[in-house]
Image: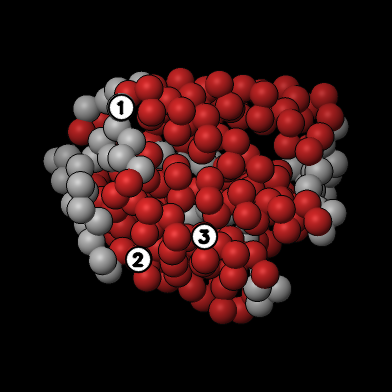
Amino acid sequence: MTIPFWLLPVFFAIALIYSMMGFGGGSSYLAFLALAGLPYQNIPPIALICNIIVTGGGLWHFYRGGYLKFERVLPYLVLSIPMAYLGGRTSIGKDVFSLLLGLSLFVVALRMLLPEKLFEVSRQVSAKEAWTIGLPLGGFIGFLSGLVGIGGGIFLSPLLLLMKWVNVKEAAAAASLFIAANSLAGLFGQIHKGTVEVGSMLPLGLAVFIGGQIGSRLGAYHLPKIRLQQMFAVLILYVSVRLLLGLL
């Protein structure tokens, strides 16, 4: 499998931007890998490995800053990790993969285009309610993440903010932990299927490592981050619609 050279600067930019928000960039990796026409079986493991590299580095910075609240993301992790592994092991056809990926990217793109003020709420959610919601929701996000090759943090982060259980930086730290754990579990599932070709993606791994390290240190620069986030969202929206229309 040959990786197109133009993906290197693109993946570098994705890692830089997403790491500012505590994300790994899996949804954008998937979008560009699909756009590059790579074999669909190889797309999820590549995205998962890049996710692990980016969020693993960013997680360390959030931990040192005191923003990682493990007990608040634990309800979502308990079922998401085994379900991500199960999703990674599950073999699906190309049309089903395109449908799930297209729908996932569509939701992600819409989320990235929504203003943060829509997620402001006025009530505190109890720990009991968080476990009641977090277990099934984490399991669902984990399975979908492992199946299509994303970490799921871009779904978890707004949910945590919606429940007012964390602040913005704590949500970013929680997303990093969630993505790293689910991506690792999903990758083990992909390895079980024999769809992982590590050697061919080493240049991409280096690109996202450098981009992720820079981005995790530049998280305070909000304006350019928002503008570039919106640009990526529009492109992801285009790719998702293209995938879905291709099924008609």
Q: Which residue is mark 3?
A: 209
**What is the secondary structure assignment of the residue under circle 1?**
loop
- Residue at x 36% of width, y 59% of height: 203
For this view, does 105 lie left or right of residue 160?
left
Whether residue 87 is situated above or below residue 23 in the rendered picture: above
State the separation of the CA atoms marked 1 and 2: 24 Å
Residue 106 in picture, x, y percent from top left: 39, 49
* Left or right: where 9 falls relative to 60: left
Q: Confirm or deny contact between disc 1 and disc 2 (CB under 8 A).
A: no
Label 3 amino acid? Phe
Q: Nearer the viewer, residue 91 or 154?
A: 91
The secondary element bearing badge 2 is classed as helix
Residue at mark 2:
8
Q: Residues within 10 Å of mark 1 (few under 14, many from 20)?
A: few
Q: Which residue is mark 1?
A: 194
Quarter of the image that includes the C terminus: top left
Q: Earlier in the sequence, mark 1 or mark 2?
A: 2
Q: Residue at x 64, y 47 (%)?
A: 175
Q: Amino acid at mark 1?
A: Gly
Q: Which kind of residue does numbered mark 2 sit on?
A: Leu
Residue name at image x 81 percent, y 56 percent = 64
Asked if the residue under mark 3 is in contact with the one under mark 2, i.e. CB atoms within 8 Å, the reply is: no
Label 3 environment density (alpha carbons within 10 Å; few <14, some 14–19, many ≥20): many
